[in-house]
Image (spheres, rainbow, N blue to C red):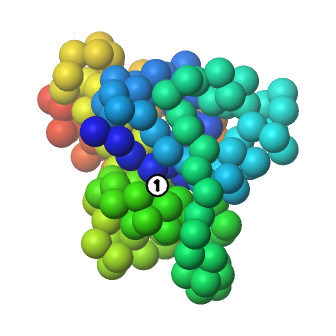
Amino acid sequence: MKAVSNSSVLISLSIIGQLDLLHKRFPDGILIPAAVWHEVVESAQGRSGAKSVAAAHWIKVMSIADTDLVTMLKTSLDTGEAEAIVLAREQNIAIVLLDEKDARKVAKKLGLSVLGVVGVLIWAKRAGIIDDLRSQLDALQQQGGFRLSRALYLEALAAVGEYE
């Protein structure tokens, strides 16, 4: 199974040393549009995610054909989000990795399934790949500045039996 990713999921998982979770969850690889590659690797040299994403042989950069749809989506989304959604549609890939609320809404309206960094971590905990979801969520917030509501934090912990 493959997925298409936006920047935030790649960066967030890289910050906490868990980028490889994506390869385990999506063994056929992750596709990213050029805008995401540019944001994560080219314009972010020296920052979290740049080296690990560039070195990940299972992440493939693909071009977008429907630039009109990208332009339309960019009225409410950033370029990486818009391109990721369009790439998922063009490649007939059902899952797009997004964290931003507006982008998630748009992707769902277009018939795509959405998974974010918290969902990836929940999957990893359930699959026995990580031992402790709480420490990963805490690291996301403390090291990566990831904004996570208290309600979502508690909901994620409850989903894997790590009660407050």
In the image, residue 3 above or below residue 24: below
The x and y percentages for residue 79 are 67, 67
Q: Is residue 82 left or right of residue 47?
A: left
The x and y percentages for residue 73 are 57, 80
Quarter of image, res 37 = top right
The x and y percentages for residue 149 are 43, 53
Q: Secondary structure at mark 1?
A: loop
Q: Residue at x 58, y 50 (%)?
A: 62
Residue 74 seen anywhere in this rendered image of the structure: yes
Say few, some or many: other residues with alpha carbon within 10 Å of mark 1 (under 14 / 14 to 19 / 20 or more): many
User: If the image is split into quadrants, where does the N terminus sit?
Assistant: top left
Where does label 1 land, which residue? 98
Amino acid type, callout 1 = Leu
In the image, residue 149 above or below residue 2: below
Question: Residue furthest toward the front?
Answer: 65
Quarter of image, res 22 = top left
In front: 25, or 143?
25
| Number of marks present in the image shown | 1
Q: Residue at x 29, y 26 (%)?
A: 124
Quarter of image, res 44 = top right
The x and y percentages for residue 72 are 59, 86
Q: Residue at x 19, y 38 (%)?
A: 158
User: If the image is split into quadrants, where does the C terminus sit?
Assistant: top left
In the image, residue 151 above or below residue 55: below
Q: Residue at x 18, y 31 (%)?
A: 160
Q: Is residue 104 left or right of residue 160?
A: right
In the image, residue 109 above or below residue 118: below
Residue 48 seen anywhere in this rendered image of the structure: no
